[in-house]
């Protein structure tokens, strides 16, 4: 304690640099983790917020919800489960800039209807609730929203949070109106029908779950996420990248801590000759490591949060506390390994060598 | 007869280097009493350092017994030896044995930290006054001259109140005037406090302060007659 802290006090400039290196390593790791997690989340948070167990799609749609078409009879064949009708399509809106959006058609009272965080829920077919991400490109409450290809204007009566699907912000409208809008956007307004939906979202209860499996297929929300175009490739790539980053950064940290202590080998040798016990030396080394790594990682977290705050709306960025805790734990562990390795060297120093 | 603070009887030390056996220290008998200041001189490689490290409980002899302050340390393990050194032996080394990042007063406080005791402010102040280093209390070793550093090293050793003081070339980095000052100081404190001090040196001029002088040649320790 005494030795470790006094050394930091004496060599302030040196230790500021050491803390800066640890802070930068942890900043890099935390920041990239939050970015990758943010991106992955922006693929799926619109469907994760359903709290659903799974989704039923048309078998021939090959897991592509945009291509899936279900009929009223298909809907009726799903039994023994809480179910909600869902229409999914895409559209383009023009606000301060052009933006692709996901269009979700839902029934007002269904469990997948969006939770409104600002304004109110949809009460007529000319109203929509939009993802609050669209506020960043100028959408305001009570604005009129038009989709490219359609002349109909919808009144924005509410906003909802965490609503993106395949990175696109979601606009929710009445299921019946969704059919009208989707047909109009695709230029096939005359072909619209009155019962088609894209998918059935299920939430399991105690009943026996059954559906017409000759034309339908059910999968869990998690499995469905991984079939979204690009999602599994993206998660695998970023996962590997960040895994390696964490692995290498941890090693660097361990080596760094090791060298830091080894540099003081001769001084520890003299202390040992003077009869200072190994236990005391080890403890002061460990105290110093804990101080340096904690401070460095704290600065790293603060930098990450500040950057995330500065980038709000520009890139998907999301702090997942569990990942942060895991990274912190791993770094502390590796620093401890580096520390223990150097302490072992210190305790093995022959004091005779230090004197001679 | 006064108690002996250090007693070596039949002590020898051999090393094997490759296929050769080196007798670093031939069979040696040696003892020192409170208030005695003894010099060991000899060329480098003569076995002076081996003698000093055995005397200080830093390494165990190949044969013979070593008694420090009445305790037979020959069979002790490293932990026990470490404790003996901490409580009964003080080292003054040629290079500064001070911790580079501790202030002069913290150099002394380190002992309290290690032993879990409180700083004896009275003793520390008295030592600083006596050794003329009161003004240096807040300074770091890098701000001190070679002579000042050795004074601080002596203060540090005396603060620990050891029975036996071992000085390995304590004047190696000092000019003549400073070297005389430091050795004079060491001799005076040894006598006043009833310590036993062994100083290893190759500087003949310094032996005027010593009660006995030994010469070391090829691992053989011999007392000089006229001293």
Image (spheres, rainbow, N blue to C red):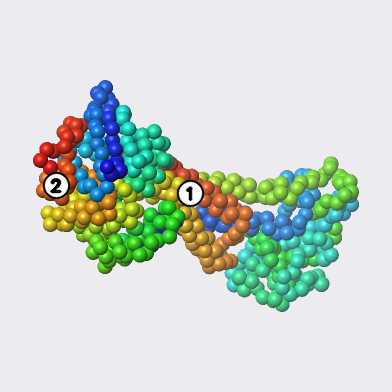
Q: In the displayed structure, does residue A79 sit left or right of residue A335?
A: right
A116 relative to B90 in the view: left or right: right
Residue B207: mark: 2
Q: Is residue A351 left or right of residue B35?
A: right
Residue of label 1: A335
The reply to whether label 2 and label 1 mark residues of one chain is no
Q: Residue furthest bottom?
A: A142
**Residue at x 58% of width, y 66% of height:** A313
Q: How many marks?
A: 2
Question: Is label 1 in a helix, a strand or a loop?
Answer: helix
**Label 1 crowding class (10 Å Cα cut-off): few <14, some 14-19, many 20+?**
many
Q: Which mark is residue B162?
A: none
In the image, residue B97 lies at what x, y percent?
29, 51
Please, what secondary structure does the residue beneath circle 2 have?
helix
Which image quarter is the N terminus of chain A in? bottom left
Q: Residue at x 19, y 31 (%)?
A: B220
Farthest front residue in view: B1
For the point 38% across and 44% down, which residue is it? B84
Looking at the rendering, in which quadrant would you find the C terminus of chain A? top left
Please rate how many residues cluster around mark 2, counting C-alpha atoms within 10 Å: few if below 14, some from 14 to 19, many from 20.
Answer: many
Give percent across and percent down for residue A312: 57, 66
Tag in front: 2 or 1: 2
Residue B96 lies left or right of residue A181; in this view the side is: left
| Front position in the image: B121 or A303 | B121
Corner quadrant of residue B17: top left
> Where residue B107 sits: x, y (%)?
34, 57
Q: Can residue A217 be seen in this snapshot?
A: yes
């Amino acid at each position: 304690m005494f030795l470790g802290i006094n050394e930091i006090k004496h060599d302030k400039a040196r230790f500021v640099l050491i803390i800066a290196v640890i802070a930068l390593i942890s900043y890099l790791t935390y920041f990239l983790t939050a970015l990758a997690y943010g991106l992955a989340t922006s693929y799926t948070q619109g469907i994760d917020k359903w709290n659903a167990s799974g989704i039923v799609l048309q078998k021939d749609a090959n897991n592509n919800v945009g291509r899936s078409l279900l009929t009223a009879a298909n809907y009726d064949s799903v039994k023994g489960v809480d179910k909600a009708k869902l229409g999914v399509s895409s559209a383009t809106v023009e606000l301060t800039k052009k933006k692709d959006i996901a269009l979700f058609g839902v029934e007002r009272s269904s469990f997948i209807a969006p939770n409104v965080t600002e304004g109110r829920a949809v009460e007529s077919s000319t109203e929509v609730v939009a993802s609050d991400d669209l506020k960043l490109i100028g959408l305001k409450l009570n604005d009129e929203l038009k989709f490219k290809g359609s002349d109909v204007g919808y009144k924005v009566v509410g906003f909802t949070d965490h609503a993106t699907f395949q990175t696109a912000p979601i606009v929710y409208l009445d299921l019946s109106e969704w059919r009208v809008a989707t047909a109009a956007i695709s230029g096939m307004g005359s072909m619209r029908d009155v019962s088609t939906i894209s998918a059935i979202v299920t939430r399991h209860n105690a009943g026996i779950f059954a559906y017409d499996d000759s034309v339908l297929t059910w999968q869990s929300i998690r499995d469905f996420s991984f079939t979204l175009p690009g999602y599994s490739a993206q998660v695998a790539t970023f996962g590997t990248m960040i895994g390696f980053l964490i692995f290498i950064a941890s090693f660097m940290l361990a080596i760094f801590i090791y060298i830091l202590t080894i540099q003081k080998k001769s001084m520890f040798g003299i202390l040992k000759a003077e009869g200072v016990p190994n236990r005391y030396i080890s403890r002061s080394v460990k105290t110093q490591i804990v101080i340096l790594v904690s401070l460095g990682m704290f600065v790293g977290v603060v930098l990450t949060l500040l950057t995330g705050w500065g980038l709000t709306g520009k890139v998907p960025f999301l702090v997942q506390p569990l990942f942060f805790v895991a990274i912190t734990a791993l770094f502390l562990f590796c620093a401890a390994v580096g520390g223990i390795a150097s302490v072992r060297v210190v305790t093995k120093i022959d004091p005779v060598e230090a004197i001679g | 007869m006064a108690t002996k603070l250090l007693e070596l009887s039949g002590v020898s030390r051999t090393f094997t280097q490759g296929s050769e056996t080196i007798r670093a220290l031939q069979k040696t008998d040696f003892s020192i009493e409170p208030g005695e200041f003894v010099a060991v001189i000899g060329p480098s490689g003569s076995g002076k350092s081996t003698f000093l490290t055995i005397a200080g409980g830093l390494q165990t002899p190949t044969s013979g017994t070593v008694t420090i302050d009445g305790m037979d340390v020959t069979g002790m393990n490293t932990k026990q030896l470490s404790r003996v050194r901490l409580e009964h032996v003080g080292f003054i080394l040629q290079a500064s044995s001070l911790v580079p990042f501790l202030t002069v007063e913290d150099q002394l406080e380190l002992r309290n930290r290690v032993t879990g005791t409180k700083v004896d402010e009275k003793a520390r102040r008295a030592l600083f006054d006596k050794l003329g280093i009161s003004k240096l209390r807040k300074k770091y070793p890098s701000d001190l001259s070679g002579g000042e550093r050795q004074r601080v090293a002596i203060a540090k050793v005396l603060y620990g109140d050891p029975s036996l003081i071992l000085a390995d070339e304590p004047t190696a980095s000092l000019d003549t005037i400073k070297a005389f000052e430091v050795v004079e100081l060491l001799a005076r404190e040894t006598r006043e406090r009833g310590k036993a001090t062994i100083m290893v040196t190759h500087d003949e001029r310094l032996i005027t302060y010593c009660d006995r002088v030994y010469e070391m040649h090829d691992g053989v320790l011999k007392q000089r007659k006229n001293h």
